[in-house]
Image (cartoon, rainbow, N blue to C red):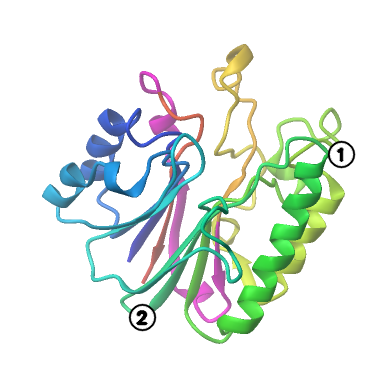
């Protein structure tokens, strides 16, 4: 199964990029973040014409997640336990061919010390509680999406310059590490231990052209799935097109 994650930064704005990309890359499952559209306005048609089932959990202007699959989607759930109808749309889950797919758009956090930053840390604690209560580390689980955290210094273009700033601060990394202690492994790092591989580049200051990015779009698998990860890559070319998202797709194959 080829699984991909991509923060598209508005599915309607990127539809002209997303449809050709999915046609060429042909993932079995594509998890999207920041779709930025209410469910009834999600552009299902072009994806359904390519043979994908579509499950969405969106809102106007901000956030929003979706799972597209060429295989049946079973037991679809939306949101973290305890979320209310007004909470941001950040989580959608489904089971595909026996593998539980947990698609996340983790809060940005804005800046260390802000209310949004503390809310991000609290959200990650709730995520770990959800894993403990509702998931099995001995089962087949893939947790992926825009985590808005670069886990290590090798995931950052200039670790010293960015030390303790948003996405790389110690509390954020510790909060993510606590989530992973549930029993999750970084699928990308199983095949790419080297530094300098990024999935997000700021639109400003020619950051993409200069190769100055962060790896914040992540794919984690439970330990039983780890030996079955046979391929992992960041499709940097998808970030280079006209009016792209600021994120690149990340793909992982599980055999």
Figure quadrant of residue 135: bottom right
**Split into 4 quadrants, where in the image is the C terminus?**
bottom left
Query: Where does residue 27 sit, x and y in percent of width and height?
Result: 29, 54
Q: Would you say residue 231 sits in the magenta stretch?
A: yes
Q: Is residue 122 left or right of residue 232?
A: right
Residue 168 visible (yes or no): no
From the viewer's perspective, is residue 125 above or below residue 112? below
**Residue at the spot x=34%, y=30% of the render?**
14
Q: Is label 2 in a helix, a strand or a loop?
A: loop
Is the C-beta separation of discs 1 and 2 under 8 Å?
no
Picture quarter with the N terminus: bottom left
Pointer 1: what residue?
164
Residue 6 position in % (x across, y down): 44, 45
Task: Tell me the crowding category of disc 2: few under 14, some 14 to 19, or many 20 or more residues within 10 angstroms, Cα based.
Answer: few
Which one is in front, 124 or 17?
A: 124
Q: Nearer the viewer, residue 117 or 224?
A: 117
Residue displayed at 28% across by 33% down: 15
Q: Is residue 208 above or below residue 40?
A: above
Q: Which of 189 and 46 is in front in this view?
A: 46
Q: Is residue 217 left or right of residue 32?
A: right
In the displayed structure, does residue 38 sit left or right of residue 183?
Answer: left
Residue displayed at 22% across by 47% down: 44
Q: Residue furthest top?
A: 205
Q: Name the residue under label 2.
A: 98
Q: Distance between the residues labelled 1 and 2?
A: 39 Å
For residue 76: magenta?
A: no
x, y (%) of residue 119? 75, 51
Name the residue: 73% across, 36% down: 110
Residue 247 percent location from the top left of the image: 50, 35
Q: Which residues are drawn in magenta?
A: 219-243
From the viewer's perspective, is residue 125 above or below residue 74?
above
- Mark 1 Cα-neighbour bin, 10 Å: few <14, some 14–19, many ≥20: some
């Amino acid at each position: 199964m080829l699984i991909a994650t991509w923060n598209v930064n508005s599915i309607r704005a990127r539809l002209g990029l997303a449809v050709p990309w999915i046609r060429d890359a042909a993932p079995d499952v594509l998890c999207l973040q920041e779709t930025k559209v209410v469910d009834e306005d999600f552009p299902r048609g072009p994806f359904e014409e390519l043979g994908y089932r579509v499950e969405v959990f969106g809102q106007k202007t901000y956030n929003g997640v979706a799972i597209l699959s060429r295989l049946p989607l079973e037991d679809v759930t939306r949101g973290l336990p305890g979320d209310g109808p007004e909470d941001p749309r950040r989580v959608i889950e489904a089971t595909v061919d026996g593998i539980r797919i947990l698609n996340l758009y983790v809060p940005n956090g804005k800046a260390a010390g802000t209310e949004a930053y503390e809310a991000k840390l609290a959200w990650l604690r709730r995520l770990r509680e959800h894993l403990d209560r509702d998931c099995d580390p001995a089962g087949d689980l893939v947790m992926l999406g825009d985590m808005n955290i670069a886990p290590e210094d090798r995931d950052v273009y200039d670790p010293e310059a960015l030390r303790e700033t948003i996405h790389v601060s110690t509390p954020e990394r510790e909060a993510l590490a606590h989530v992973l202690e549930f029993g999750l492994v970084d699928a990308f790092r199983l095949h790419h231990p080297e530094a300098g591989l990024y999935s997000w580049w700021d639109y400003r200051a020619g950051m993409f052209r200069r190769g100055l990015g962060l790896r914040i779009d992540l794919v984690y698998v439970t330990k039983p799935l780890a030996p079955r990860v046979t391929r992992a890559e960041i499709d940097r070319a998808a970030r280079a097109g006209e009016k792209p998202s600021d994120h690149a797709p990340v793909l992982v194959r599980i055999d």
